[in-house]
Amino acid sequence: MKDIAWLLPALPLLGFIINGLGRKALPKMVAGVIGSAAVLGSFIIGLMLFMHVHETQHGEVLNYYRWLSVGSLVIDLGLYIDQLSAWMILIITGIGFLIHVYSMGYMSHDAGHNKFFAYLNLFVFFMLVLVMGSNYPMMFIGWEGVGLCSYLLIGFWNTNTNYNNAAKKAFVMNRIGDLGFLLGMFMIYYYFGSLDYQVVFAKVAGVEINSPIIVGIALLLFVGAMGKSAQLPLYTWLPDAMAGPTPVSALIHAATMVTAGIYMIVRSNIIYTFAPSAQTVVMVVGLATSIFAAIIGLKQNDIKKVLAYSTVSQLGLMFMALGVGAYSSAMFHVTTHAFFKALLFLGSGSVIHAMGNEQDIRKMGGLWKKLPITAWTFLLGTLAICGIPPLSGFFSKDEILLNAFTANPVIWGLAVVSSLITTIYMFRLLFVTFFGKFRGTYDQEHHLHESPASMTIPLVVLCILSVFGGLLNVPEIFGGNAWAHHWFGEMLFKPALGGIEHAVSHSMELVLMGVMLVLIAIAFVVLRNKYITKGAVPEADEEMTGFTKLVGNKFMVDEIYDFFIVKPIYLFSSALYYVCELKFIDLIVNAIGDGIVGLGRLFRRLQTGNIGFYIFTMVLSIVAILVFKYFVV
């Protein structure tokens, strides 16, 4: 395994180098094939490693190079292949390959086509480093790398100032979270003397439960996860990140990068198991984020913004699962979410492509007949995220809700509210976009057409995964053996915490499922009546009032941040500039410069060009030296 594992990240890196250096010389088709083939090669190797882990049933550390050795600090450039990393590898490279293929059609007319594929390959490389690294510094390298790629891809169309601002916002907010991650690593090394997973986790097992040390480490790592996975209060960068091309939204901001925080907590599950207080914080923040973002999604009219807030909400649901100890359930939902959310984002890209870059759903409508493949796949993706059986989202959401009920019925009730709101805004998005009459311009209607095969084939594949992905973890109540739960249970400190061994009877489990399905059915009927039967779609220029306006304006969170954080910092910086920089530092620097210039002008007068004067000064200097030596020395 050691001989081929290094090829997994190496192939996308090679694709980045080739497409990056040859971005001006390579034909677009060649660059697209190289970028896609690099990720496909990694996927094939990932399958081989997955089968190896499946056969051996244990992880393996593969050290290649001693990167750093300072005193007791030893950091190896190594890979850790176990159940968790093997699973994540398949998600990253599998979904990544489909999105690369999709991009060949979506970006075919873009002048930066080759550079785009280079950035995508670089992202896949760093994401693989993040999940395959054998220690926290390796994870941090990948962590920072995907942040860099996110910045490059969000601001890919850099001639637009708003897009550049969105890229900078994502970069800055991620750095805030990354500081927490970095401080967490410092604490881990200070108290445990190592940053290697195996060493740290073995030592954590001897720490007292809920000790300040372990709780502090867990909370600092969670701060990093909050930034990368867009949780309150560090979530506002993700909706703005929709400024990037749609394949970027699907790959980075739906299926892979934003799940890095989930991965980090699951990888560090023993730390959180020994810090139940920190787990409670994770649960509360995740649940609050899930409900808050879902409410905002109700009144968004940009097709990608709706999906962006949906992503924030679903990530919150995953963190809630982590907070109640359901690590395998969270990872199962990470997987199904990658399927249907990548499908929905790519489907939205197909709609935007057909609408001539229009993203306002109020200017769409009636697209079902013109975009049949896109419409059918979008419908199934919507049903999956809403949790309609037997699609994948039903199994993963039900498992999370079951764990929430086991932990506390109140948590379950709030999670049900979040899931119901998800159903409402997703059916609204589906009905307004694809049903009713067309509300766009004549030119848009005249040019409506289905996307090319390079875009629709990935949609179909992701649709199949969204429909049948639930088979990975069919619960016992339906005759399954919860295979995914047992797969992850091998690397969890407490395998029982995963949604299979719970205190809820099968009859109660059926009741919980029934409650959720009845609520979904009611929401479907009400929304269908409103948006299809009555055609109650607001006009694009309609003014919102009251609470509706507050929700439509995203609870003014960006404005609040701007007023209480950005503007005070800007004013403080301006004051420092005018008072300290101009009136003090610049004054001193300029005074020194002016003094040297003045001295230069003074001594320049000594250069008269008169030989007699030079001889006189030489004699005078000799006399002065002799006097000084006689009387002083």
Image (tube, rainbow, N blue to C red):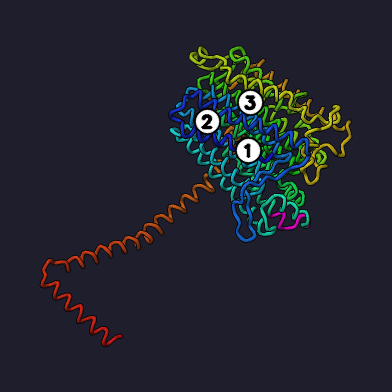
Q: Is residue 381 left or right of residue 577?
A: right
Q: CA distance from mark 3 to mark 1?
A: 16 Å
The crowd level at tag 2 (other Cα within 10 Å; few <14, some 14-19, many 20+) is: many
Q: How many marks?
A: 3
Residue type, label 3: Leu
Q: Secondary structure at mark 3?
A: helix
**Of the image marks 2 and 3, the number of the one nearer the N terminus:** 2
- Which residues lie in the magenta part? 208-216
Does 209 appear above or below 399?
A: below
**Of the image marks 3 and 1, the number of the one nearer the N terminus:** 1
Residue 389 lies in the magenta stretch: no
The crowd level at tag 3 (other Cα within 10 Å; few <14, some 14-19, many 20+) is: many
Residue type, label 1: Val
Nearest to the observer: residue 414 or residue 488: 488
Q: Which residue is mark 2?
A: 117
Instruction: Locate residue 364, reporting x and y percent.
Output: 56, 19
**Of the image marks 1 and 2, the number of the one nearer the N terminus:** 2
- For marks 1 and 2, give the one nearer the viewer: 2
